[in-house]
Structure formats: structure tokens, C-alpha cells
Image (cartoon, rainbow, N blue to C red):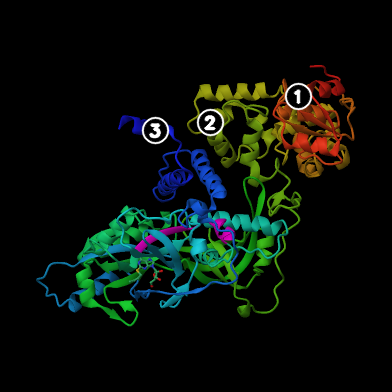
């Protein structure tokens, strides 16, 4: 009936129908995003759908289903993890001890023997997989909905970690129609290397800012295992995990059981599980050997850790024929690569200075073969990390090298320490240039303060000085600076202005015309402005805006160079950290010398008088802004008020003097009225500032 159809369109869907629709859409998009890495919609649109579903569920709690994407982070914090008995035990795999690629030949020979194949029989079909370095997980789906996620435990009994596994975006909470009524999917939960590095970086920041009970993680596997076993799934959510499927446990009501390992993985993939793209079907030993070699070469470029590859007899019928020895199937073997962690000793602890002045303690190691290369240096990150791990000269340590990440000292074997070597301390001076090395409050790293002078920072300092928004030396880019510094033509900034045409034209690949252009650009850059010059010096925390404020406030460079921390703090937008940084910079004799030499080379700008302190008619008054104003944006209003000495707060309290309300003012206006705080409009505010609209 056409009229009926029309009705269907006109009626808004019931909350239940809309919730179901949203769940389906969100499942689809989560799969595109997390598993396929091919989102179809922007993140903001996903968030919008997500919030709509959240809102429906908040109003109708009975519609909140366990497979709802909103349930990926549960609320409750568990007291302990509950044991789960696996319906089908989780097996382990035998390890091939021969680490050469040809180790696969022995496995193939054994398989052929056990399958009673003769030399004239065709090669055996295998599935070659990666051996992921994470932790095994069993995901139980009933009627297509994830009901339990359990760790391997001893293979018979694991732990229920469903609440945490739900936070893993790659793991489907619900499977498509037509899957077996009971299905256990098995695979590996792991942490990607980049996410592991980021997590540790966040942990180091937390430790540096004084957080108690925080630590860094030894490797992605430990980080993943720790995240999976949390009692509070909110912690797990902040430690991003991933998943690869490679096996299955109990399966009930399977309409079309596959005949091979490969077909199983393909259907798991079709149902939405991530399956490693490197998984390869191999015929006979030769192809297994080739696979081992190929993955070995690729290993460093993979985004996650593997500790080897796994070969499995592909045919399930042949697997069944071969059976098990104790807990290990005869039809599979793990073939390892060189370990990514090794023991060695620390011969010295050096401090290296990076391009931006960051000081990094580096352990000099007795050479050790880790993750396929010989390692002699490993980072200790910063002083706090070095001291927290308590690495000392002579110590026996575990080093880790995975992928193209810089090798790292993971931990010290304290029992093996001989004598009582002193703990590591960061030098007070930059080991390269002798300028003071400082660590700002709340920061993890020490930095050299000799930015302009320090050889380690030369290239960076020159590029910054030449920047379009600094003194602007057109044509002086990355490559040229590299050449100039490496050839020894330039040691410090003033050397730039001593470069003549001959020196420039003598450089590799430098045409006469380009050399002329650079000479002209250098000449042109000499006439500059104080803010550009100040910004160009590359003082930490002094961006363009701060440079302008400094110039406006002090008028003259010498006044800035001689200002006390207190005097610097009076400048708009200059807080104690920035003031200290400027002060320390100009305290370094080397930096002052560079400035003098630059002036001697002819760099000049117009100097002015120190700005009279702007009148501060609103000093001591606190304002709160709410709603939309007729002429000003909120930021503009805030700037005006602050320039007049007022404080602008985010919420209304008894201490608020005025609430400036525009249209569509919300709860802040109500609160002002309740507390009896004066409410004014934009025009009244401008009148107070003495700037009529
Ligand atoms: S299959 C029937 N495949 O290795 C064998 N395991 O010692 C069941 N692992 O605990 C496991 N990658 O955590 C299999 N492609 C892979 C694997 C893999 C890593 C781990 C897994 C298991 C251990 C077996």
C-alpha cells in the first residue's frame, strides 16, 4: 500500500529501531577505521553517531546492549580477575631450534614422515604465518555477540578480561549474520611499536612531572599484558591495543566448516577480524625457507614485534591425522628470529646533544648482537630515566632493539653489579659547548642554553635565524646550511655574513647566479626589525608573538639583554618560565658574543623607547564571558580585558565582579543571577575599557 509506505517514511523511527540502526552503522565504521584502516566518514561524524546512541541509551537504559559500541569502556572497576575454563584447551607450539632459514627443512621432513609420504608424493601445503609477540586471547561469541574474552593462562584455565578487550577497536563486539552459534576466535593481542613508544613517552612525562606509582614499560608485549590485566578498563583504553586472529577454539553449529587453515583465516577476515597480510600459503620446504628469509628482511619495517614465523600444515584433515604430543600439535612449529633483547655491559655513559639542544644520556655498550644488528649505543632518554633505572658504569643490562627504533637500555641486573659505582648525574654544562645545561620544571629533558654557539645545534640555529619570519635570508635552506656547516665554512651565525661570493660559488652544485642571490639575500637581511632579530635568536619559548611583546616593552635590545627575571616577567604573556629562559640565554657569554658580532657585521634595526606601561583601569577585577557578543569574538574581548589589567575566569563564583553576557548566554548567566553578580553587555564592557563600540 503506497499510503502505508509514506507513513513509514514520515514516522521517526522508534528509539529501539534507531538504536539498532546506530549500532549497526557504528560497527561498520569501527571495522573500516580500526581493522581496514579505511574510514569512510570523518571522525567527527563517527563521534556524532556515537553520541546519539549514547543519548538514546541514557534515556532508555533497557536498550543498552552488551554489543553496543558505547560499552567498549565499562564503568565498574573490578576487584579481581575471574578464572575462565577454556572449552577447548589453548595449545602452545613447538619451537624449531635451528635458527637458520633452512630449519624449515627439518620440519617438513618430519611432517612428511608422520604423514607417511614417500619421496614421490607431492609437496605438503602449509600456511606460513607471523609469530606475533603479544599475548594469546580467546574470544567467545554466542549468537554472534562477544560474551567472554579470556587470556591463555595455563592453557586449561585463563582469566576473564572481557571488560578490557572490549576497548580494543579492532575486535568486533558483534559478528555478521550466519556465523556459528558458538564461536571461539583465537589470536594475539599486541601493542604496535609506535603506540608503545608514545605510551612510554607519556609515562616519562608523568614521572617527570612528579606522578607517583607510574613506570615505563619494558617492551610492547609487557605493556600489552599489563593493559589486558587491568581491573579498570579506563586504564586499558589509554594503552592502545591491537589484535590478529590466527586460530579458533570451540565452534558449534557451523554450517560450512572449512577444510584448511587458510580458509579459516579467510572467513575470520570476512567476519571482521584482522588477519596479518603477510600470511602466505607455501608448497613444500623451499617455500617455507623463502618465507622465513623474506619476513626476516621485512621484520624491522613491520609496525609490530614478531619473534619468529609459524608454519602450519594447511589441510585440517592432515592436521587431524598428525595429532598432538602433550600440549603441542605435531602439525605446527614456531621458527624464531634473533632475539630483540640481550644482555651486555655498560662501558661508559656519555651525554649527546641533539639538534635542538636536548641532552640525552647514552650508554656505551660492550658490542652485542640484538634484533639482527650489532649494538654499541643505547639511549637512556633523560636523567630521570637513567636514575630511575639506576644504570651505572660497569652494570650488566638488558638492551632492546626492535624495528628502526633507537636501541634502549631496558633494565639493570642489580645482582651482577660489582662494587659501588656512582649513580649517573647530568653534567651542569653542555658537553659540546660548555654553556649551562638546564632542566625546566615539569620537563623531562635537560637542554643546552648555548643555542647560537653550540656546535651540535649549529644547523638548526642557522636555519631558524634565516627563517622567513626571522631575519629572512632567502635561499638559505636545509641543503645549503648542511653543506656550509659540514664543510667548516660556518661555525657560528656571524660567519654567515663573512661568506663572500667566492666561498659560496666554490660549493658543490652552486651556480654563479645562486651564489650572487645568496650574497644579495644576506645583505638584505641585515636591515631587519628588533622582533625579527629576537625571534631569530631561537631563545627557547620565545616565539614571534613574545618577541614582539619584548620589543614593544623594552624598545632596545640592550635593555632586554640586561633585564632581570622580574623585569622580564612584567612583559605581556611572559610568565616565569619564559622570563627565566630569556634571562639564562643572555647570561651565557657565548650568546652575548654572537649578538655583538652580528651587530658588528652590520645587522641593524630601529630601536625605540620603552613603552609606557599601558593604563590598567580594570586591574584587580575578575570578568566571566558568556554567550555571543554583537561585535567582538570572545577571544578579542578577553584580550582587551586582560590588556586593561582584568582577569578573565572560566566560571562564575562569588569572586566574579562582572559577567559579560551576549546572546544565548547559558548557565553562567543563571549562576551570576543566583549569586547576585553584576551582569553587563558588550557595550557596557567597552565603555569601562574606554573604547566605545
Ligand atoms: S597458533 C595450535 N599462530 O605463540 C597452536 N600462535 O606457543 C595454537 N603465537 O600462545 C597457537 N603467533 O600466543 C599460533 N600465528 C600464530 C601465532 C601464535 C603467535 C603465540 C601464541 C601462543 C604461542 C604458542
Q: Is residue 557 in view from this perspective?
A: no
Which residue is tagged 1?
A: 604
Residue 184 sits in which quadrant? bottom left
Q: What is the spatial separation of the Cα atoms under label 3 and label 2, in whole angstroms?
A: 83 Å
Badge 1 or badge 3: first in the primary sequence: 3
Residue at the far top in the pictured view: 693
Residue 301, image x and y in percent? 42, 54
Which residue is tagged 2?
A: 506
Q: Secondary structure at mark 3?
A: helix
Badge 2 or badge 1: first in the primary sequence: 2
Asked if the residue at tag 2 contacts the one at tag 3, i.e. Cβ–Cβ closer than 8 Å, the answer is no
Q: Quadrant of the N terminus?
A: top left
Please tell me how crowded label 1 is: few (under 14), some (14-19), or many (20+) other residues with Cα within 10 Å. some
What segment is highlighted magenta in the picture? 233-246
Of 114 and 683, the residue lying toward us = 683
Of 438 and 110, the residue lying toward us = 110
Quarter of the image where ligand 1 sits: bottom left
Which residue is tagged 3?
A: 7
Q: Is residue 633 in view from this perspective?
A: yes
Residue depicted at x 62% and y 73%:
395
In-image side of 392 versus 238 (left or right): right
Of 638 and 148, the residue lying toward us = 148
Amino acid at each position: 500500500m503506497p499510503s502505508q509506505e509514506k507513513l513509514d517514511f514520515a514516522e521517526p523511527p522508534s528509539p529501539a529501531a534507531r538504536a539498532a540502526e546506530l549500532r549497526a552503522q557504528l560497527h561498520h565504521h569501527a571495522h573500516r577505521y580500526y581493522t581496514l584502516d579505511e574510514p569512510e566518514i570523518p571522525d567527527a561524524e563517527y563521534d556524532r553517531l556515537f553520541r546519539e546512541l549514547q543519548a538514546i541509551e541514557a534515556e532508555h537504559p533497557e536498550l543498552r546492549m552488551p554489543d553496543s559500541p558505547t560499552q567498549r569502556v565499562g564503568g565498574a572497576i573490578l576487584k579481581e580477575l575471574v578464572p575462565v575454563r577454556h572449552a577447548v584447551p589453548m595449545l602452545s607450539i613447538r619451537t624449531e631450534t635451528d635458527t637458520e632459514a633452512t630449519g624449515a627443512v627439518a620440519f617438513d621432513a618430519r611432517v612428511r614422515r608422520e604423514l607417511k609420504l614417500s619421496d614421490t608424493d607431492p609437496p605438503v601445503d602449509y600456511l606460513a604465518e607471523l609469530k606475533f609477540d603479544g599475548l594469546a586471547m580467546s574470544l567467545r561469541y554466542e549468537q554472534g555477540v562477544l560474551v567472554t574474552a579470556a587470556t591463555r593462562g595455563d592453557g586449561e584455565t585463563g582469566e576473564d578480561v572481557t571488560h578490557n578487550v572490549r576497548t580494543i577497536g579492532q575486535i568486533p563486539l558483534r559478528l555478521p549474520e550466519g556465523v556459528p552459534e558458538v564461536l571461539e576466535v583465537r589470536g594475539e593481542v599486541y601493542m604496535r611499536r609506535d603506540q608503545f613508544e608514545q605510551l612510554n613517552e607519556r609515562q616519562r612525562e608523568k614521572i617527570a612531572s612528579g606522578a607517583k606509582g607510574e613506570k615505563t614499560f619494558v617492551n610492547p608485549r609487557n605493556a600489552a599484558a599489563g593493559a589486558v590485566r587491568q581491573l579498570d578498563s579506563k586504564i586499558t583504553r589509554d594503552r592502545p591495543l591491537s589484535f590478529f586472529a590466527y586460530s579458533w577454539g570451540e565452534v558449534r553449529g557451523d554450517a560450512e566448516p572449512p577444510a584448511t587453515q587458510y580458509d579459516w583465516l579467510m572467513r575470520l577476515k570476512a567476519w571482521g577480524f584482522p588477519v596479518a597480510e603477510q600470511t602466505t600459503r607455501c608448497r613444500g620446504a623451499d617455500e617455507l625457507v623463502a618465507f622465513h628469509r623474506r619476513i626476516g628482511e621485512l621484520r624491522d619495517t613491520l609496525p609490530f614485534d614478531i619473534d619468529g614465523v609459524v608454519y602450519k600444515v594447511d589441510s585440517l584433515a592432515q592436521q587431524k591425522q598428525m595429532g598432538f604430543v602433550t600440549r603441542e600439535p605435531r602439525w605446527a612449529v614456531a621458527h624464531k628470529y634473533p632475539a630483540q633483547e640481550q644482555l651486555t655491559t655498560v662501558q661508559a655513559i656519555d651525554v649527546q646533544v641533539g639538534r635542538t639542544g636536548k641532552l640525552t644520556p647514552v650508554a656505551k655498550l660492550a658490542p652485542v648482537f640484538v634484533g639482527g644488528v650489532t649494538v654499541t649505543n643505547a639511549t637512556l632518554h633523560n636523567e630521570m630515566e637513567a636514575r630511575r633505572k639506576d644504570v651505572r658504569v660497569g652494570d650488566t643490562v638488558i638492551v632492546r632493539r626492535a624495528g628502526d627504533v633507537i636501541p634502549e637500555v631496558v633494565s639493570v641486573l642489580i645482582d651482577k653489579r660489582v662494587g659501588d659505582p656512582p649513580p649517573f648525574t647530568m653534567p651542569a654544562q653542555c658537553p659540546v659547548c660548555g654553556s649551562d645545561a638546564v632542566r625546566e620544571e615539569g620537563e623531562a629533558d635537560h637542554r643546552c642554553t648555548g643555542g647560537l654557539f653550540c656546535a651540535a645545534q649549529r644547523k638548526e640555529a642557522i636555519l631558524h635565524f634565516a627563517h622567513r619570519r626571522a631575519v629572512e635570508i632567502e635561499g638559505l635552506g636545509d641543503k645549503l646550511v648542511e653543506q656550509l656547516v659540514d664543510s667548516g665554512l660556518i661555525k657560528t651565525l656571524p660567519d654567515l655574513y663573512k661568506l663572500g661570493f667566492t666561498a659560496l660559488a666554490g660549493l658543490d652544485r652552486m651556480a654563479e647566479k645562486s651564489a650572487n642571490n645568496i650574497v644579495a639575500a644576506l645583505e638584505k637581511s641585515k636591515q631587519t626589525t628588533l622582533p625579527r632579530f629576537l625571534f631569530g635568536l631561537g631563545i627557547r619559548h620565545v616565539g614571534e608573538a613574545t618577541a614582539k611583546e619584548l620589543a614593544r616593552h623594552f624598545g632596545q635590545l640592550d635593555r632586554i639583554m640586561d633585564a632581570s627575571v622580574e623585569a622580564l616577567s612584567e612583559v605581556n604573556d611572559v610568565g616565569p618560565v619564559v622570563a627565566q629562559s630569556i634571562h639564562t640565554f643572555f647570561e651565557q657569554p657565548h650568546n652575548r658574543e654572537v649578538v655583538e658580532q652580528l651587530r658588528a657585521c652590520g645587522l641593524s634595526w630601529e630601536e625605540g623607547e620603552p613603552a609606557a606601561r599601558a593604563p590598567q583601569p580594570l586591574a584587580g577585577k575578575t570578568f566571566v564571558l558568556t554567550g555571543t557578543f554583537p561585535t567582538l569574538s570572545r577571544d578579542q574581548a578577553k584580550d582587551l580585558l586582560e590588556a586593561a589589567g582584568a582577569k578573565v575566569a572560566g566560571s562564575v563564583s562569588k569572586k566574579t565582579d562582572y559577567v559579560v553576557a551576549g546572546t544565548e548566554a547559558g548557565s553562567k548567566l543563571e549562576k551570576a543571577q543566583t549569586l547576585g553578580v553584576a551582569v553587563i553587555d558588550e557595550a557596557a564592557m567597552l565603555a569601562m575599557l574606554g573604547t566605545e563600540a
